[in-house]
Each structure stands twice: as structure tokens, then as C-alpha cells.
Image (spheres, grey):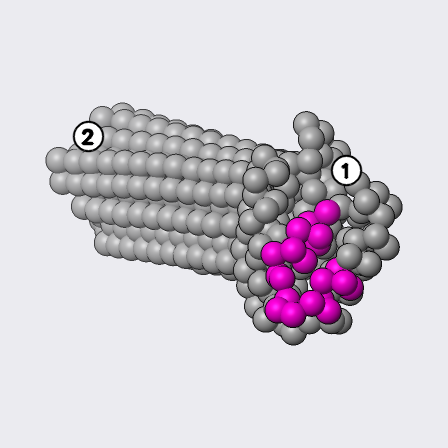
């Protein structure tokens, strides 16, 4: 039964005067949502804070939350130096977010929600499994070390957000916007980033193993030392990106583009690079052993000291590529196009060069 905020505050006034203070009784009162609406919850908690020590307030808040766990379907709790964030499933159509014990915002399913992070940021936001599709976070929001694992964040906007060290494993980020976002050391294992926009995003040390990034835009991004093993990157765009020392082993990259990308010392062993556009890419010291590069474009690419051992480069275009010290031992180069000058600089031991087209 809903009660008025004045009625709740009156009850709390009585309880704080009793000795010893009954924190559980106060928590019971504080856990009621007043009939006046969400804004009055803040008044109630402000009243509690003005009458009791921080230690007692913290204890009351903890008890109130534990009571709430038994009353709602999908709760979460994460304590940080700045705030407690919680999410409750309100009904089939909406969610309620609580900040510092106060109802902060109701998020409607299927609607465009806007979440403004309070001054100073909100570190370690914990929203595992939450439904937050179409949510627009404050540009530049600080969400360091947050937990969004398994959450539905499709079509959400994290533009310029700070998600350093966040856990987003298994999250749905289809069509999401993460332009210029700080995603260093973020756990993106198994996430779905289909058609997402990660232009100029910083992904240093990010884990994207088994992630889906089909037709994802990573133009100008910075996934240095990132883990893309077994990821699906069909049609993804890495043009002008810096991804040296990243791992793409057994990844699927058919028809992806890496034009003018810096991919030095990367690992593409056993990767599917069919019809990939690698024109002008920096591939020095890269490992593409056993990679599938059928009809790949490597025009003007820098392949110095790179390894294509047992790779399939059928009908690949390597005209104008710099290949000094590259190793193509055991590779298939049927119908591949290559400059004559490059033949003197490359090892083709045991390679199948039948039908290779040699240009001047």
C-alpha cells in the first residue's frame, strides 16, 4: 500500500528519537515508495541523512536494499566510491534505476531513454542482464569498471564514454554508437556489435574473442594488442585504424577492409580473409600462416618480413606490395598478381605458383 512521503517521514522522525536506534524499522519505512511519486523518495533519504550518522545511513540503506531483493524480479547492486546503482524490473514495459537509494530514472522498453550521469561520474555501474536498448548516455560519461554483461544495449549511445575495464561479456550492442569511446581492457567476449559504430574508439587490450562485428565501423579506431580470436568480422571496416600486435587467429574477416591500416606484428593465423581489402596496409612482421586470402587485395601493402606460410592467396592482388623478407613457403598463389621485382626478395619454397600473373 502506497503512503504519502510526509507520513513516512513522520514515522522516521519518531524512530530516530528512540534508543537504541532500530535501523531495521527505519529501513522498512525507507523502502516504501510514496504515492506522490518518485521525486519524493529523494526527500525521504535526504531526511534520513540529515538525522543520522553516515554509518547508520549506510546500514539502513543496506537493509532496505536486502528487503527490496525479495520484492522485485531483477535487482542488482554495486557499491563504489561515488554511488550505488540498482535496477529493478518494474513491469513488462519499464525498468527503474536507483542511485544512492533514490529512484533515479524509469527506462521504458523499446523507447529512446536518456541517462544523464551526475557530476563526478558514476564508476562501476552494475547492470548485468539489464534491458537498456535505445538508451543514450551522457556524452563522455564515466562508466569505468562497470558491469553490462548479458545486457541488451542495442541501439544505445555511449559516444565518448569512458568504459575503461568494463565487463560487457555477452552483451547485445547491435547498432550501438561507441564513437571515440574509451574501451581499453574492456571484456567484450561474445558480444554482438553488428552494424555498431566504433569510429576512433580506443580498444587497447580489449577482449573481443568470439564477438560478432559484422559490418561494424572501426574506422580510425585503436585496437592495439586487442584479442579478436574466433570473432566474426565479416564486412567490418578497419580503414586507417591502428591495430598492431592484435590477435585475429581463426577470425572470420571476409570482405572486411583494412585500407591504410597499421597492422604490424598482428596474428592472422588460420583467419578467413577472403576478398578482404588490404590495400596500403602496414603488415610488417605479421603472421598470416594458413590464412585464407582468396581474391584479397594487397596493392601497395607493406609485407616486409611477414609470414604467409601455407596460406591460400589464390587470385590475390599483390601488385606494388613491398615484400622484402616475406615468407610464402608452402602457399598457394594460383592466379595471384605480383610484381616481377618482388620475386627476388621473397621465399616461395614449395609454393604453388601455377598461373601466377607476373607484372613489370
Q: Is residue 273 above or below residue 24?
A: above
Q: Is residue 82 above or below residue 290?
A: below
Which residue matches tag 1?
1
Q: Which residues are magenta?
A: 12-32
- Residue 78 placement (x, y as % from top left): 54, 55
Whether residue 349 is visible, yes or no, is yes
Question: Dot 2: few (<14), some (14–19), or many (≥20) neighbours within 10 Å?
Answer: some
Residue 121 is marked as none
Q: Is residue 258 above or below residue 45?
A: above
Q: Is residue 49 above or below residue 36?
A: below
- Residue 34 placement (x, y as % from top left): 80, 47
Question: Dot 1: few (<14), some (14–19), or many (≥20) neighbours within 10 Å?
Answer: few
Residue 352 is marked as 2
Q: Nearer the viewer, residue 354 or 141?
A: 141
Residue at the image point whose x is 31% and y is 32% from the top: 292
Residue at the image point whose x is 42% and y is 42% from the top: 189
Residue at the image point whose x is 65% and y is 70% from the top: 19
Observer-side mark, 1 or 2, equals 1
- Residue 31 placement (x, y as % from top left): 68, 50
Q: Nearer the viewer, residue 158 or 2?
A: 2
Name the element at disc 1.
loop
Amino acid at each position: 500500500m502506497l503512503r504519502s512521503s510526509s507520513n513516512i517521514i513522520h514515522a522516521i522522525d519518531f524512530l530516530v528519537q528512540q534508543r537504541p536506534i532500530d535501523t531495521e524499522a527505519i529501513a522498512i519505512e525507507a523502502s516504501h515508495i510514496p504515492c506522490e511519486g518518485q521525486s519524493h523518495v529523494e526527500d525521504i533519504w535526504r531526511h534520513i541523512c540529515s538525522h543520522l550518522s553516515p554509518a547508520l545511513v549506510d546500514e539502513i540503506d543496506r537493509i532496505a536494499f536486502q528487503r527490496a531483493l525479495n520484492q522485485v524480479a531483477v535487482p542488482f547492486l554495486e557499491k563504489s566510491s561515488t554511488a550505488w546503482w540498482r535496477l529493478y524490473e518494474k513491469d513488462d514495459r519499464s525498468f527503474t534505476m536507483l542511485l544512492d537509494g533514490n529512484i533515479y530514472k524509469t527506462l521504458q522498453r523499446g523507447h529512446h531513454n536518456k541517462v544523464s550521469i551526475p557530476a563526478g561520474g558514476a564508476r562501476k555501474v552494475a547492470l548485468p542482464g539489464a534491458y537498456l536498448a535505445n538508451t543514450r548516455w551522457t556524452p563522455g560519461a564515466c562508466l569505468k569498471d562497470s558491469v553490462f554483461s548479458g545486457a541488451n544495449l542495442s541501439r544505445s549511445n555511449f559516444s565518448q564514454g569512458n568504459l575503461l575495464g568494463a565487463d560487457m561479456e555477452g552483451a547485445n550492442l547491435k547498432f550501438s554508437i561507441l564513437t571515440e569511446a574509451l574501451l581499453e581492457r574492456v571484456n567484450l567476449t561474445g558480444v554482438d556489435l553488428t552494424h555498431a559504430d566504433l569510429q576512433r574508439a580506443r580498444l587497447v587490450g580489449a577482449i573481443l574473442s568470439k564477438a560478432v562485428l559484422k559490418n561494424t565501423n572501426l574506422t580510425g579506431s585503436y585496437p592495439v594488442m586487442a584479442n579478436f580470436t574466433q570473432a566474426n568480422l565479416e564486412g567490418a571496416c578497419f580503414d586507417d585504424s591502428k591495430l598492431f600486435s592484435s590477435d585475429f587467429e581463426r577470425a572470420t574477416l571476409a570482405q572486411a577492409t583494412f585500407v591504410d591500416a597499421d597492422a604490424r606484428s598482428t596474428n592472422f593465423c588460420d583467419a578467413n580473409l577472403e576478398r578482404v581489402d588490404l590495400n596500403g596496409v602496414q603488415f610488417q612482421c605479421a603472421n598470416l600462416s594458413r590464412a585464407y586470402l582468396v581474391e584479397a587485395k594487397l596493392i601497395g601493402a607493406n609485407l616486409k618480413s611477414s609470414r604467409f606460410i601455407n596460406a591460400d592467396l589464390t587470385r590475390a592482388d599483390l601488385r606494388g606490395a613491398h615484400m622484402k623478407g616475406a615468407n610464402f613457403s608452402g602457399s598457394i598463389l594460383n592466379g595471384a598478381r605480383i610484381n616481377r621485382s618482388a620475386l627476388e626478395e621473397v621465399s616461395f619454397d614449395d609454393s604453388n605458383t601455377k598461373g601466377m600473373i607476373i607484372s613489370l
